[in-house]
């Protein structure tokens, strides 16, 4: 049977209450704020009228302001999945209960937001992607049109297991100091570590600190630029083996040991190579070879247009005069007499400084003609002896203050006692015996 209640059209049919419209519940004399129960689109609907609906215990609303809002006082427990069709705005912290978040899409944080772990010694905040063998990366980036920037405050660490920072081709910029304690930086093959203009790679702050740049096995360290290959080394102590495939420009250096050229050649280009010393110095050429040749000095004139009388090599001795002017004192020139193929010939010329001018003191032709500019003097007393296939000149002290010309020749001197044929005679020493050389003006 039907029972009419409150004149609201609410009727009881068997054990069900039914109404042709909504049912309103007034809990107090406040007739502006109440609860309605209705059905819309075949869905039961409980609505607060006049203000937001409160479930559980009364609480202080943070964002609920209208009759469309619901405030849950106390705890809200859902035994099942929870789906949010719009924005979730948090006025407090979320306690995850050490549970995993799965299927999370993009998350947007307002400026100044912080993701933090609970304070305490050893507290760790872990960002992890994929499985242990996965290739998914964690990307920290900005969505603005500017530069993608990530700022790491204080320290961050890599655990053992091969973790690393990777870039997709963009620049990884580190504005502050990076400390590696007993660690190794490993790059992939053909990778590049770029230092900006005026950048510095250095070790500690003291003069005794050492910065080691090493290559494994036969791998080489190449210092280069995209334009001209240039490597500038200021103060350096070099050890081990140094190899260069291009041009090495070396400033003034102080050698602490020997230089081993390994059969290489010093190329001076269009300049000259000099060896300077502040003390009396010698130039040593030493070989440890057991061959028949000792060290020798070879000068090569690589001329594309050789000509007779070319000086193909020279040795010069230079000094200063009393006025401090630098003049060539003496030189020995090696001159081409004939450059014709198959008929090549050379001679040697000796020059000395005489009265502020260079004088050809003596020459030795290709066939052995010795041509002194002035005379030949013999400073030592050396007796002459008979020698086969030889003619030589010397000086012999035949008596006190009486040095004579000593001649060595292959044949004996013929005897002739008729001195009346000559007007003068001169003592000479021939083959160990004293003779008189007879002279006449006609």
Image (cartoon, grey):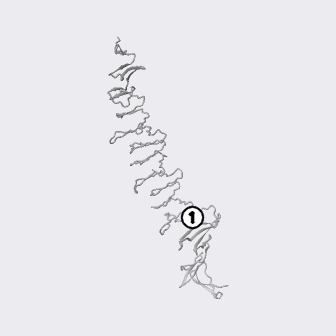
Left or right, residue 2 beside residue 226: left
Q: Indicate whether 314 appears above or below 92.
A: below
Nearest to the observer: residue 398 or residue 93: 93
Q: Is residue 375 above or below residue 296?
A: below
Q: Quadrant of residue 10?
A: top left
Which quarter of the figure has residue 386? Answer: bottom right
Please say whether residue 86 is visible from this viewpoint. Answer: yes
Pointer 1 local density, CA inside 10 Å: few below 14, some 14–19, many at least 20: few
* Residue 76 appears in the figure: no
Residue 365 point in image, percent of width and height: 62, 71
**Towards the viewer: 420 or 140:** 140
Quarter-of-image position of residue 306 = bottom right
Residue at image position (36%, 20%) is 24
> What percent of the width, then of the height, locates residue 98?
35, 34
Q: Position of residue 6 (x, y in %)?
A: 34, 15
- In which quadrant of the rendered image does the C terminus lie? bottom right
Dot 1 falls on a residue whose secondary structure is loop
Q: Residue furthest top?
A: 1
Q: Which residue carries the number 1 mark? A: 299
Location of residue 348 in the rendering, given as x and y in whole percent from the top left corner: 60, 70
Relative side of 224 to 2, left or right: right
User: What residue occupies the far bottom of the structure in this picture?
Assistant: 420
Q: Quadrant of the N terminus?
A: top left
* Front-most of residues 160 and 24: 24
Is 228 situated left or right of 345 in this image?
Answer: left
């Amino acid at each position: 049977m039907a029972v009419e209640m409150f004149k609201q059209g609410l009727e009881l049919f068997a054990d069900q209450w039914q109404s042709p419209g909504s049912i309103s519940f007034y809990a107090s004399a406040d007739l502006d704020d109440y609860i309605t129960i209705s059905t819309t689109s075949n869905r039961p609907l409980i609505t607060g009228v006049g203000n937001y609906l409160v479930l559980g215990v009364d609480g202080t609303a943070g964002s609920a302001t209208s009759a469309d809002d619901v405030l849950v006082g106390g705890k809200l427990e859902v035994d099942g999945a929870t789906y949010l069709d719009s924005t979730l705005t948090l006025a407090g912290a979320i306690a995850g209960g050490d549970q995993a978040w799965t299927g999370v899409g993009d998350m947007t944080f307002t400026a100044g937001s912080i993701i933090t772990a609970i304070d305490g010694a050893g507290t760790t905040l872990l960002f992890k992607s994929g499985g242990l063998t996965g290739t998914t990366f964690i990307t920290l980036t900005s969505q603005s049109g500017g530069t993608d920037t990530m700022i790491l405050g204080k320290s961050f660490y890599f655990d053992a297991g091969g973790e690393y920072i990777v870039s997709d081709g963009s620049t990884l910029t580190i504005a502050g100091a990076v400390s590696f304690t007993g660690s190794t930086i490993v790059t992939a093959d053909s990778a590049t570590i770029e230092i900006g203009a005026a950048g510095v790679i250095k070790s500690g702050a003291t003069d005794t600190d050492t910065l080691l740049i090493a290559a494994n096995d036969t791998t080489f360290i190449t210092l280069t630029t995209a334009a001209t290959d240039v490597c500038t080394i200021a103060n350096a102590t070099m050890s081990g083996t140094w190899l260069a495939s291009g041009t090495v420009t070396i400033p003034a250096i102080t050698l602490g040991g020997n230089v081993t050229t390994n059969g290489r050649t010093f190329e001076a280009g269009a300049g000259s190579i000099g060896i300077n010393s502040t003390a009396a110095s010698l130039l040593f050429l030493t070989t440890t070879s057991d061959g028949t040749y000792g060290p020798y000095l070879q000068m090569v004139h690589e001329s594309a247009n050789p000509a007779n009388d070319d000086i193909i090599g020279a040795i010069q001795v230079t000094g200063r005069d009393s006025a401090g002017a630098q003049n060539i004192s003496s030189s020995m020139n090696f001159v081409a007499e004939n450059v014709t193929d198959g008929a090549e010939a050379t001679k040697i010329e000796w020059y000395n400084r005489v009265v502020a001018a260079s004088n050809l003191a003596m020459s030795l032709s290709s066939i052995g003609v010795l041509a002194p500019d002035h005379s030949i003097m013999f400073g030592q007393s050396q007796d002459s002896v008979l020698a086969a296939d030889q003619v030589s000149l010397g000086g012999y002290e035949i008596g006190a203050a009486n040095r004579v010309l000593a001649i060595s020749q292959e044949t004996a001197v013929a005897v002739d006692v008729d001195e009346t044929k000559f007007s003068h005679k001169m003592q000479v020493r021939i083959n160990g015996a004293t003779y008189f050389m007879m002279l006449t003006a006609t």
